[in-house]
Amino acid sequence: MTDDRTAGIDRSRPSIARVYDYLLGGTDNFAVDREVGDFFLRELPGSVAMPVANRQALIRAVGAMARDGVRQFVDLGSGRPTADKVHQAARRHVADARVVYVDNDPTVLAHGRALLAADPRTTLVRADLREPEEIRRHPEVRRLIDFDEPVGVVFSAVLHHLDDSERPAGLVRWWVDRVPPGSLVYVSHFRSVGSPGGESGRSPGGEPGGNSGGTEEGRRAERKLRESFGRGRWRTDEEILGLLDGLDLLEPGLVPCPLWRPESAGTGGAPADEGDLSVWERLISCALARKPSAAAGQDR
């Protein structure tokens, strides 16, 4: 077993990755993480639907990217690889898909590297999301990712853990500027819905007000996350779409995660619109967008 001190693991402070792991049924977490997770499970019943819906949408989005021809992925702020991993989802469609997982949590590194050690086309890099140049220069990233070919860049449930002062939109733009046209960018994000989103997948026309879903439950959830991790902000649909500025938004646009290309759509087994969702399922949204060609950008 990895020695916590050697690995740099701090059992006294909760970890975003470990709390997510706990809420998703994992075992790589400590009492301090379970305390945060139990707040959601006990005080905000049903809130576990947010990480579950987020993970399911991520797997569908990775499959969509692979079907679109993307063969390499960078998963930023990946957390601990779960039972259904990004590289597994991609390889259902592209057998030789390559994936770089990036996280700065030492627990993720300690356990994830062991899980991925036997796979030469995947790697787990310890780096801070906010230091993109360091990530791109990492030898493992250079080994697996060819930045002359389309890349799938994944920001799954990570940008809402950054304050505005940490320039989340600037981080997305940094990566967009360094991948070629045809690359795909996926974002999922906790959502403020002071103004309800429409079924078209576009941002609401009202002012970017509201917070944490406009519900007391949402406000309590956002407060708990900020108290536990010291930073982060839920954003409106308009603000989330701003993270993808300059990219071509793909169908169905920005929608709550359960509504993003559900696998049983049209069979009666999938939600048709937001009215079919729980309050918690409405509070995590996602979108997939493509970097256009230079000529297409000039035509805008």
Image (spheres, rainbow, N blue to C red):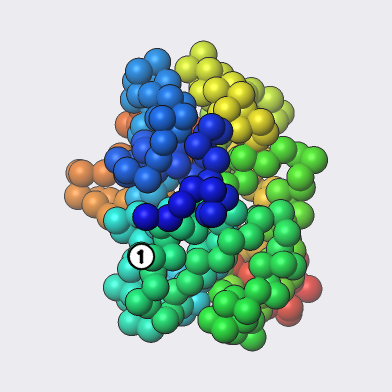
Q: Is residue 34 above or below residue 298?
A: above
Give the left or right position of residue 223, taking residue 296 as reference: left
Q: Quadrant of the C terminus?
A: bottom right
Q: Quadrant of residue 29?
A: top left
As drawn, 180 above or below 153 = below
Q: Which residue is mark 1?
A: 115
Q: Residue 126 location in percent, x, y?
A: 58, 61
- Percent coordinates x, y for residue 264 in the rendering: 24, 52
Foreground of the two, 153 or 267: 153
* Residue at point 31%, 58% (across, down): 84
Q: Which residue shows up at 66% across the image and 55% down it?
A: 128
116 or 42: nearer the viewer:
116
Residue 164, by quadrant, is top right
User: What residue appears at the point 44 percent right and 65 percent down from the top-left corner?
Assistant: 113
x%, y% of residue 59?
37, 58
* Disc 1 crowd, CA 10 A, few/some/many (<14, 14-19, 20+): some
The answer to whether residue 288 of the structure is visible from this angle is no
- Left/right placement of residue 102 relative to residue 29 reads right
**Quadrant of the image containing the N terminus:** bottom left
Instruction: Residue 209 in the image: state x and y as whole percent.
Output: 68, 25
Residue 27 appears in the picture as rendered: yes
On screen, residue 101 versus residue 49, left or right, reads right
Residue name at image x 33 percent, y 82 percent? 95
The local secondary structure at tag 1 comes to helix
- For badge 1, the amino acid type reads Leu
